[in-house]
Image: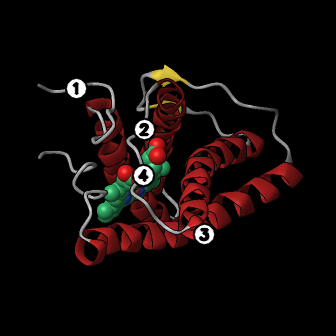
Amino acid sequence: MMRLRSSIDRWGLVARILHWGMFLLFGVTVFIGFYMVDLPRGFAKYQVYSRHKSLGITLLVLAVMRWLWRLIDTAPGRPVMPRWQSIMSSAMVAALYVVMLVIPLSGWLYNSAAGFPLQWFGYIHWPALLDANPSIKVIARQVHEAAVYIFMGLLLVHIAAACKHHWVDRDDIMRRMLPFR
Ligand code: HEM
């Protein structure tokens, strides 16, 4: 049976869908982000930016859902490991949860401070956080970019750790997060 909630030895369906769905969406959105900045000015650039922003809003909503779900869901247990490792593991997870919010939030702040309107895929008007503000615009832009680099660094460690659990320790940390058994 497909369990929505996590159990002691397996992440539930909701946690797995959020994990792998956000993996794909973040990949696409970050890729578009790096690609779009060098496009020549024009309608095509505007369209690509709009896509990036809509995907970013989607990621923001998903991140909030993930935070909430993590608070009400149980997490599978941890295998026995040295103390430093379990502290590192908790710190990594906390850092990932923070950056997955900071990235879309700073993008939204940047867009608001720049005074650009925002429509979610052209359907839903998304409000601005504040009025146009040139100095906040600069800071939000820097935070947005720095957070993406931090995210990519964290992700490298995260993926390396998952691979080590799977192929070196040979425990079931990786298996219990995989989409299918
Ligand atoms: C190839 C890519 C990835 C692999 C192989 C992978 C693997 C894993 C595994 C095996 C776990 C479960 C750890 C455990 O059971 O304690 C996990 C948890 C987690 N992953 Fe990933 N992951 C990947 C990409 C990502 C991405 C892109 C993000 C960020 C959006 C992410 C964020 C997280 C978070 C926050 C947790 C902790 C879940 C929680 O404790 O609530 N992962 N990942």
23 or 40, which lies in front?
A: 23
Mark 4 Cβ and ligand 1 under 8 Å apart: yes
Residue at screen point 85% across, 44% down: 133
Secondary structure under tag 2 reads loop
Residue at screen point 47% across, 34% down: 66
| Three-letter code for the amino acid on which mark 2 is drawn | Ala
Q: Is residue 100 above or below residue 115?
A: below
Secondary structure under tag 3 reads helix
Q: Label 4, label 3: how many angstroms apart (C-alpha)? A: 13 Å
Which label number is shown at residue 75? 2
Q: Label 1, label 4: how many angstroms apart (C-alpha)? A: 19 Å
Q: Label 4, label 2: how many angstroms apart (C-alpha)? A: 9 Å
| Three-letter code for the amino acid on which mark 4 is drawn | Arg
Q: Are marks 2 and 3 in contact (CB under 8 Å)?
A: no
Regarding residue 47, the answer to whether it shows in the image is no
In the image, residue 165 lies at what x, y percent?
Answer: 32, 69
Q: Is 39 on the left or on the right of 143, as rendered?
A: left
In the image, residue 156 lies at what x, y percent?
Answer: 44, 73
Sequence order check, earlier mark of 2 and 3: 2
Mark 2 Cβ and ligand 1 under 8 Å apart: yes
Query: Quadrant where the N terminus lies?
Result: top left
Q: Label 2, label 3: how many angstroms apart (C-alpha)? A: 20 Å
Q: Label 1, label 2: how many angstroms apart (C-alpha)? A: 13 Å
Q: What residue is shown with label 4?
A: 78
Residue at screen point 36% across, 45% down: 19
35 or 45, which lies in front?
A: 35
In the image, residue 33 lies at what x, y percent?
Answer: 48, 61
Q: What residue is shown with label 3?
A: 84
